[in-house]
Amino acid sequence: MKSAQQIASEVRSGVTTAIGELTTSLRAIRERNDELHVFLYVDEEGAIEAAARIDERVGRGDDVGPLAGVPIALKDNLCQTGIPTTCSSRILEGWRPPYSATVIDRLMAAGAVPVGKTNLDEFAMGSSTENSAFGPTRNPLDPSRVPGGSSGGSAAAVAADMTPIALGSDTGGSIRQPAALCGLVGMKPTYGLVSRYGLIAFASSLDQIGPFAKNVTDAALLLEAIAGHDPMDSTSLPEPSPSLVAHVNDGVAGQRIALVRELVEGADDDVVASVYRAVETLRDAGATIVELSIPELHLGLSAYYLIAPAEASSNLARYDGVRYGLRVDADDVAAMNEATRTAGFGDEVKRRIIVGTYALSAGYYDAYYGQALKVRTQMIAAFKRAYQQADLLIGATTPSVAFTFGSKTKDPMAMYLNDVFTIPTNLAGEAAVSVPFGTGEAELPIGVQLLGPGRSEARLFAAARVLEIAEGRS
Ligand code: GLN
């Protein structure tokens, strides 16, 4: 499939049409969606309308934007006016949002063509899409394995060449981990860089929307189109969207990059070997390599599994059978609430709500939630110290390549451990990118993770691009 950049430039210059590109995308979806279960909803009509409008405007000589005619897949926790938005949960079945997320408005303004909504772990809680109420997504590279999660559908859409780019959300790793498992570039931007208006909340202090693409330039193009201040999100950073595409070829000469011991510890040998090879590649490209230990990173998983469920228990209180989607009738309101939530939420969501409610309850608040917040503060301080010694950090994205269905569903802790390397960035509100680098077991892709301080996206993409060029990709 053509890159997003190529499609946009061809559509803008009239070499190809948005309708033509959309047709290619819809054909690919039709061919493999039944097998892979990537899209929960394909908005063929809306996409055709949007594409036709782009072509008409190109015909009139309008500037249709940097994503002109580029088909894009959207994780199904992003609200789009009139389009079913489920979060892969029975509790939202049939609900159609009355408004669109800011990112979708920005995509449309940039000329992109949203084609549909992709599968995820219910309410973005999970690492494999096996928690979707509508059945899992298969990894296009090996359908016996998971695509990762929670944004597994968006990753699979790009990996299966259904769309060149997609949006996901990352609360603890849900963009970077599936990107790694599907051989894609995936970025978790700095907290506040991308508006969360219209993203259905999981853990509001951690959630960020970000891009999936087959290459660094497309990921930068997409992030540039959606980033920048939005008055509708009170946590949105005040600055406009940064310039990213212009810097992808800046390289790493003179950059100090730290290999972090805790970000490879416990990873499979094939993954560790890829990280070491990436380090050598960056050194050859002119970076100064240092080695660091950040012991606080060990505390990330425990803090996350108190903070994220605590916020989720509060955010998910709104699904009461009154305002959205599902309602299971009963004798009185309390019984109706209970019956609705019992029927509407899956096991993992219930587990998080119970843990979160407990952690916030009187008598336990200080012992659990309060402690976790202190750990979070320590983590932020530890990263700050690390960034006095290095411009960027490097490690693994995930402990292993894509795993097989069912291999971690019996043991929540084994599943949670998938995000051990990605969670610290969310707790710190910083940025990180996963870039494919080498292959491991069964020839499956491995993701190397580059981490940076807040607003370091341009630098991260430039370093990721050095690795992508070394691998012979574009
Ligand atoms: N896998 C992690 C979790 O289950 C992260 C999910 C995410 O980033 N949305 O919470």
Image: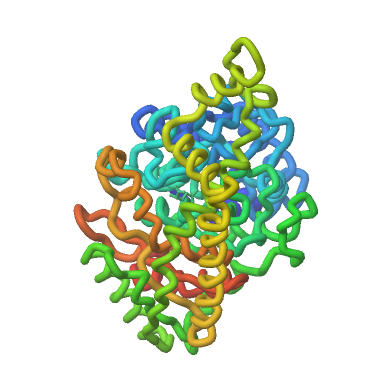
Q: Quadrant of residue 72?
A: top right
Q: Residue at x 65, y 37 (%)?
A: 79
| Position of residue 409 measured from the top left corner of the image (x, y, whole percent) | 31, 40
Answer left or right for 353 relative to 82. left
Of residue 288 and residue 321, the one placed in the foreground of this image is: 321
Q: Is residue 354 visible?
A: yes
Q: Residue furthest top?
A: 331
Of residue 377 and residue 142, the one placed in the foreground of this image is: 377
Answer left or right for 150 relative to 190. left
Of residue 162 and residue 421, the one placed in the foreground of this image is: 421
Of residue 233 and residue 401, the one placed in the foreground of this image is: 233
Question: In the rendered image of this protein, does residue 163 appear above or below residue 9?
Answer: above
Question: In the rendered image of this protein, does residue 201 appear above or below residue 220?
Answer: above
Q: Is residue 20 visible?
A: no
Q: Residue at x 45, y 63 (%)?
A: 300
Q: Quadrant of residue 455?
A: bottom right
